Amino acid sequence: MEKLLIEGGYPLEGRVNIGGAKNSAVALIPAAILADSEVTIDNLPQISDVQLLSELLEEIGGKTALNGDSLTVYPENMFAMPLPNGRVKKLRASYYLMGAMLGKFKKAVIGLPGGCNLGPRPIDQHIKGFQALGAKVTNEQGAIYLRADELRGAKIYLDVVSVGATINIMLAAVKAKGRTVIENAAKEPEIIDVATLLTSMGAQIKGAGTNEIRIDGVDSLHGCRHSIIPDRIEAGTYMIMAAAMGKQVLIDNVIPDHLESLIAKLREMGVHIETNDDQIYIYQTGNLKGVDIKTLVYPGFPTDLQQPFTSLLTKASCTSIVTDTIYNARFKHIDELRRMGASVKVEGRSAIINGGTTQLQGSKVRASDLRAGAALVVAGLMAEGITEISGIEHIDRGYENLEEKLIGLGAKIWREKMNAEEMKEVENA
């Protein structure tokens, strides 16, 4: 077990290249199950979730070949192998195996998904969609059993805008008989990315990126090659780091339109930002002003950037209020920020940050989930002294080559093995 150490106070300067979108990759890899021939996915982020999903595809009889940032999936010999336990429970995105296997084999057994503990994240909208398509869904001994004699298109209204449910229903519906209409669909760029892959495989999908997606089922899907869009959350995290400690930082391989809400809030704080087709340039600013944010579904402010942004606000003048309308348990980083000297408190769904009152101090802190880990990295870069972050397996789920990229910008960051006493502390936490 390792820990991440950061000596704060070093300015960031230079260029950082953004990898492929993690939230696309974890849906695109299961989508490859639906093809009858090989699928190659390029620009994959080198993160642990990708490795886990590749191993799961091999468990159900597929073959995978990873070459740099390209993964080729050979689905010809896949079968409806039950996956009630094991790797499937290690990541939340394993639920995409439900839609893909149901669409391909008309049956699936998938253990209830794991991943970051962000409070209740029910999959009732996924199940509602599967049932509307004609599947029988039961929960047996901690696993979801899906069975269908035939899948038929249906009109499905999502009670809650859900990226996961929108994608999962798409996966199940592309080979169903007739037309499926998903109303109140999520609009995230990752949904368009998945729809683009499926369309390249021969699916008939219209309206991805709007609140109504129409899918006309086809009998078969063929292989293709697809390149993942840049990761807007990784890009946003480096933008926040640059706003906190940057002199001149160029963020490359990014789609600025995907980050309009963050750009607007950073500019409101007084951060100097320039954009062009695929780059964002952030350069040194004076005093940062406090702002209020409220997370919303896309194109609103992303919940995945709320935690890193909260760390940045500890440096801003005045009081800021951060409200998360998506996940009510996404404030587990607040206690850790307080360990570092931040003046922050949580009231219901909101965090109140008294920014600019104290200098953050390096401390021993623990990442409770992926984006909380990113928040602590931001705090560590700003802090005086050395910050030690445990629980970095969460960070590795979503940020490729984090240390190398930050070192390239001038940060002082490294990993060390944890000793037995430290490992025991983490286990008892």
Image (cartoon, helix red, strand yellow):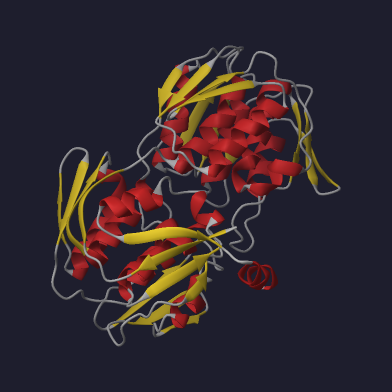
- Taking the image as drawn, is residue 74 in sight? yes
Q: Is residue 88 left or right of residue 237?
A: right
Residue drawn at point x = 33 percent, y = 49 percent: 405
Q: Is residue 1 left or right of residue 192?
A: right
**Circle count:** 0
Of residues 92 and 210, the one nearer the viewer is 92
* Residue in view at x 70 percent, y 15 percent: 77
Which is more toward the observer, 364 or 245?
Answer: 364
Residue 200, by quadrant, is: top left
User: Residue 142: horizontal and vertical position, in percent?
Assistant: 81, 49
Q: Is residue 307 visible?
A: no
Q: Is residue 390 above or below residue 83?
A: below
Based on the displayed image, in which of its 4 quarters is residue 172 positioned?
A: top right
Quadrant location of the C terminus in the rendered image: bottom right
Q: State whether residue 100 is above or below residue 271.
A: above
397 relative position to 303: left or right: right
Residue 301 horizontal/vertical position (percent) = 36, 58
Looking at the image, residue 367 lies above or below residue 39:
below
Quadrant that contains the N terminus: bottom right
Q: What x and y, as percent, mark residue 189?
A: 39, 40
* Residue at the farthest right position: 141
Looking at the image, residue 362 lies above or below residue 236: below
Q: Residue at x 68, y 43 (%)?
A: 128
* Residue 422 place in picture, x, y as percent: 61, 70
Residue furthest to the bottom in view is 357
Classify residue 294 by image quadrant: bottom left
